[in-house]
Amino acid sequence: MTIEIKPLNAIVYNQNKVDIKDVIAPPYDVIDEKYRDELYTRSPYNITRLILSKAENPYSDACESFNNWLKGEILVKCEKPVIFYLIQKYNLNGKEVIRKGFIARNRVEDFSSKNILPHEFTMSGPKEDRLKLTKACQANFSQIFMVYSDPEKQIEKAVDLSGMPFIDVTDDNGVENIVYKIEDEKTIQLIEDVLKDKTLLIADGHHRYETALNYRNFVGKNAGEADFVMSYFTNMDDDLLIYPTHRIITRWVEPYVLLEKVKKYFDIKDYTFTGINKTEVKKEFLNAIEKSAKEQISMGLYMKNVNKFYLLTLREDVSSILDEYDVPDVLKDLDLTVLHKVILTKELGFTEDEQMSQNGIKYIKVENEAFDMIDMGKAEASFIMAYPKISDIKRISQAGYRMPQKSTYFYPKLLSGIVINPLQ
């Protein structure tokens, strides 16, 4: 069975009636209550009112709003099937980063087909919530983030970007999102042909993909539009950046007791700073983590009331350390496996349930926040993780395993409100 890609029978915002900047939003799972209120006030048609309604029954409210917006032509259907090409631009440490990809539909497949691979575990709560919303509205409001491999970059070379973009909007994180419509049948056919023999890796949106599986099964045989789900596809061979998710200890631990526990397994190099040179030393410390991680499992440690950053480099053979745990070989050379099994579980006594529910430990995506929580006294220690390697994700997924919870962070997030995919 091959990957089946189709253009979208797209529903989009009518930009003659709304300002696209006022109606877009990030995915539902990164919107807190305060930010949701802010998005609500921007426009009575902000997509948050569909993906994260504040009503007592959010699902029926979203359905009512969705239908009313269609009747009022706030949302309109595209005249012909279309694929959207998305270019995202942002700055990282003073350098411009560009990520390119396209939004289309792909046939929903069980993971047993090995054509579409997950790399992280999911939780039941978000899947139940998204399934209720999908049943109520019969539409996909957000994309699943898929990664494929094409060293020849055939799609990137074929897409014509000479015309005016359909959307050009900068989001609240300062990311410019430039969207082009692809309606040319030859280009659409090329995209379908390039992807058909590929393996897709779910980079982000595991809950949404499993919701699509559940919805297809709910609809039953010959599910029609429900056999497909809206996804964003990007080429891992086009300089794809993946960010780490750092581990923050909020349960009290005496810093030098923690350091002694860590020393059992890691060689340690400290980077002492003062108030004057902290920024410079921090930059040196972060560079050292990345350099060391290319050779051996490495991570950083920063603790409350200690004016030092610590580079941790695994000293012992990783297999011998993990022998007492039921860990597949393919996961043994992963930094997070060592951190969770040896330091968090064995040395600090965190149970699996506590780690999953973030009880006494938090998973932080924003690097500066991992340092700021220590400086503000909101946490005891931060384990600063190295950037994940796409080769590790691919290797682990192809072997049929998944990485620890919250292993990767794909930035920028994909906006909701660019396009809606109807499922009826």
Image: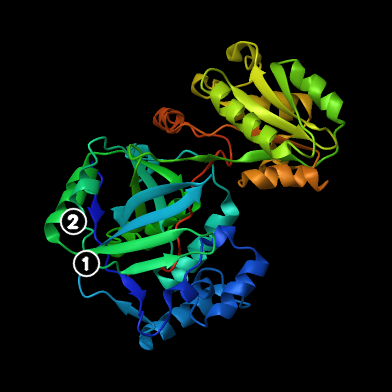
Q: In this view of the protein, which residue sits in the foreground, 295 or 363?
A: 295
Relative to 49, is 96 above or below?
above
**How would you rate the neighbour count of disc 1 (Cα within 10 Å): few for under 14, some for 14-19, many for 20 or more?**
some
- At 48% from the left edge and 81% from the top edge, which residue is drawn? 65
For label 1, the residue is 81
Relative to 183, is 337 above or below?
above
For label 2, the residue is 188
* Number of the label disc, if any, that sits on residue 107: none
Q: In this view of the protein, which residue sits in the foreground, 76 or 93?
A: 93
Q: Position of residue 352 (x, y in %)?
A: 69, 35
Relative to 293, is 420 above or below?
below
Relative to 240, is 22 above or below?
below
Amino acid type assigned to the residue bearing label 2 in the image? Ile
Amino acid type assigned to the residue bearing label 1 in the image? Pro
Q: Where is residue 57 in the image (x, y as percent from the top left)?
A: 59, 76
Q: Check the image and name the residue furthest to the bottom.
A: 72
Q: Reading the chain from its start, which is encountered first: label 1 or label 2?
A: 1
Q: Is mark 1 on a helix, strand or loop?
A: loop
